Image: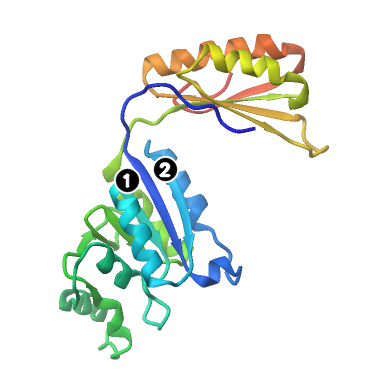
Amino acid sequence: MADSQAGAGKARCRGGLIVIGDEVLQRRVDERNIAAVLDAFARYGIEPGEVAILADDVDRIAQVVRDFAARFDLVLTTGGVGPTHDDLTWQAVAQATDDALVLRQDVVDAMEARAGKALTPEQRRMAVLPSKTEVELLPAGGFAMHTGHVWVLPGVPSMAARKLDGICARYQGQVPAVVEAYFTADEWDVVAAIDVVVAAHPAVQIGSYPLFDPSLDHRLRVSLRAEGDAVGVAAVVAALAELLAAIGEGKWVRTTWRSGGPAET
């Protein structure tokens, strides 16, 4: 059921996501940012590298931010940016980047202009940021803040989602070729056939996912993925053809291209 590893391919921007908050770990809120971020990565050809879900522990958050910043081209964090005692993300980012926290008057001014009134001392805490934080206007409106390639987003899903396209577009890569084939076969019975295709196509990442829902018209979904250039698309097409032959077209239900190929075959 695990994905095979793709062979050598073009370097692409790699992204990491850090989800922050006791409320997420303790299921006090519904976590929806992971799916939204991974969908945005897929739209913009950003290779997802890792997702971490962390408690409100400033030292641990700082440790993971530092680690992700060293390994990934784009780091997104969600949560922990409000005015309350447990909003620790900016403190952790400052610690991770060896920066000092300062009151950013430009951010205070922008927040007061939007609110139409002066902020309370408690509300002004949201403008205490690492000194090197940049505030970027987004094409769709609003703004996002980042320190280097670490972008800090709110935890509220609707607020975070509005910023994703504007951020991820800056790290645009080639969207991979992804196709999914659906079969009535049980994975248990066709592992050998899948193994043959995997061995013959090392440049194609192949994932096999059994399903056990009797209401579905299939029992197996196989995903094939490669670079989105002409060579990668051709590799996926060839691997797909061999997969259909190996499992048997009598057990094939349909094939759907998710990206990088024709709409559907």
Image quadrant where one finds the C terminus:
top right
Picture quadrant where residue 41 is located: top left
* Residue at position x 41%, y 60% in the image: 160
Answer above or below: position of 68 versus 209: below
Q: Which residue is mark 2?
A: 49
Relative to 137, is 207 on the left or the right?
right
Which of these two is toward me, 141 or 167?
167
Image quadrant where one finds the N terminus:
top right
Relative to 33, is 127 on the left or the right?
left
| Mark 1 to mark 2 CA distance (whole Å) | 9 Å
Q: Which residue is mark 1?
A: 71
Residue 231 percent coordinates (x, y): 39, 14
User: Callout 1: 10 Å neighbours few (<14), some, many (20+)?
Assistant: some
Q: Amino acid at mark 2?
A: Gly
- Secondary structure under tag 2 reads strand
Name the mark on residue 254: none
Picture quadrant where residue 57 is located: bottom left
Q: Are marks 1 and 2 in contact (CB under 8 Å)?
A: yes
Answer above or below: position of 128 versus 140: below
Picture quadrant where residue 227 is located: top left
* Residue at position x 78%, y 38% in the image: 212
Residue 184 percent coordinates (x, y): 77, 24
